[in-house]
Image (cartoon, rainbow, N blue to C red):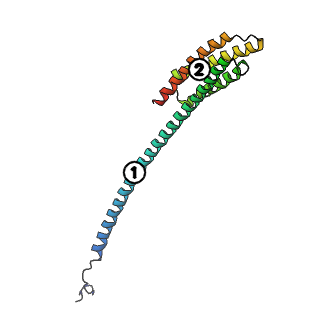
Amino acid sequence: MVNATLGIAPTAPTTLPFISDWLGVVSVGLTLIGFILTILSVQKSKIAADQAKEAANHVNTAFLKYNTVADLSSAIAKLDEVKRLHRLCGWEILAERYSDARKIITSINQPSYNLTEDQQSRLQNAAMQLNKMENAVEKAVYDGNKDNTMLLKHSKILSTVIDDVLAIIVAIKNI
């Protein structure tokens, strides 16, 4: 049959517009699902990155703690050697050992070691005591006035310094 006014034959209705509409809706839905999955993936990645950062900070803290204890233990070993030299009256090498112990303690008493103010104060006091004893021993050796009672006094001071350093080690280990 032909349309008499236009001269066009009628056509059967097609389903093509209906299918393309549904395909558009489905593609929008899939796009939204993909977007949501991307957002969830980004959130999981952020959580994983935060956990990795926290783990790295923990490792850094543990490493610093280990280094601090090791350095303090090295200082105690030097101080014990100085006490042994006191007993042996090893005047000639005492000043050098005082200096070695003082350098270790001074190197530890830095902000990077994360010590408390009290711990820093104790280490500063220890370094000053070692410096005074080093100077006294050097003067005694130079003057030829090697008074062994001075070494006894120094040993008592060193015992206090060692106790302070040990207290710092215990405090660090208990953190």
The foreground one among 64 and 83 is 83
The foreground one among 125 and 44 is 125
Location of residue 123 with respect to 47 vertically, above or below: above
Q: Taking the image as drawn, is residue 116 in sight? A: no
Tell me the tag on residue 89: none
The foreground one among 27 and 16 is 27
Q: Residue 76: give x, y in percent of width and height.
A: 58, 25
Q: Residue 137: give x, y in percent of width and height.
A: 70, 15
At x 49%, y 27%, the residue is 170
Location of residue 130 with respect to 24 vertically, above or below: above
Tell me the tag on residue 44: 1
Q: Amino acid at mark 2?
A: Gln
At x 53%, y 24%, the residue is 166
At x 60%, y 18%, the residue is 158
> For the residue labelled by badge 2, is the local secondary structure a helix, a strand or a loop?
helix
Q: CA distance from mark 2 to mark 1?
A: 47 Å
Across the whole image, how many numbered discs are drawn on residues?
Answer: 2
> For the residue labelled by badge 1, is the local secondary structure a helix, a strand or a loop?
helix
Q: Amino acid at mark 1?
A: Lys
Q: Residue 63: give x, y in percent of width and height.
A: 53, 37
Read off the residue under disc 2.
124
Earlier sequence position, callout 2 versus callout 1: 1
Q: Is residue 92 left or right of residue 29?
A: right
